[in-house]
Amino acid sequence: MPITKHSETLLKAENLSWVKKNKPILQGINFSLVPSEHVGLIGPNGSGKSSLLKILSFLETPTSGRLTFQGGNVPRPIPLALRRKIAVVFQEPLLFDASVQENVATGLTIRGLHRKQTRRRVQEWLERFGISHLSKQHARSLSGGEAQRVSLARAFVLEPDIIFLDEPFSALDAPAKEALVADLASIFAKAQTTAVLISHDFNDILRLTERTVILLDGKVAAEGSPSELLHFPESHPIGKFMAHWQKA
């Protein structure tokens, strides 16, 4: 059954800018996200993709502009209850020195969820990511693909309002990446997950997102479906980037 997108805005950035060490990183960014939407962020190195993701996920504070969540201004400092509505997965899994099961359960334990509920949810997400057979295995003994599956399960088990994925496949070999992208596409299709994905691989964007935002020089240069963005001529800056990006 296809996921029904809701019309209300979950997260919105208006005229958002960020200056770091006197260098403009992001300029006049307007961005919105609705529940159950999957959005790709793409652009050349240094275009501001990871910087925008960090601001949208409350890891950095913009220099100017307005950021709202569920219609209300995002306060500073960020309340713990609001931070817990967000999960982030990076290129490196950053797992704890513990078993797979303990890693996935960590966030729920910190939140004080009942032990029985924690076990049920951990088992559910271990199964969804195909790693239930690794539950007792130590995280330091995992392959790269297995470790990233644990990292994703640890984020998804929290059932966040938004999950941000910052190039989660780039360190994986081709077979491990293909299997993980396929599983994640299936999870996106079945779950009410709202996600923002950064990837350098056009196939990831095609398979996992419905809308794509292109950043060039810290600004939103274009947005639309991945297929729509292919229609720019190569004489246009967007077309030039897309042609180069697909060949990379």
Image (spheres, rainbow, N blue to C red):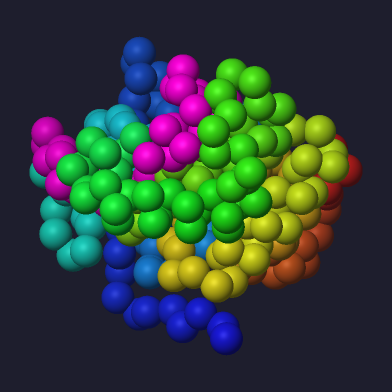
Query: Left or right: where does residue 69 sit relative to residue 29?
Result: left
| x 64%, y 66%: residue | 186
Judged from this view, the residue extending furthest toward the right is 247
Above or below — where is 121 with respect to 37? above
Q: Quadrant of the C terminus?
A: top right
Q: Is residue 70 magenta?
A: no
Count of numbered tags: 0
Query: In the image shown, does 148 or 165 lie closer to the viewer?
Result: 148
Q: Give x and y (percent) for residue 200.
A: 70, 40
Query: Left or right: where does residue 207 sit relative to residue 50?
Result: right
| x 70%, y 52%: residue | 181
Query: Left or right: where does residue 159 sit relative to residue 85?
Result: right
Magenta-highlighted residues = 76-105
Quadrant in the picture for residue 208: bottom right
| x 15%, y 40%: residue | 80
Query: In the image shown, does 60 or 169 lie closer to the viewer?
Result: 169
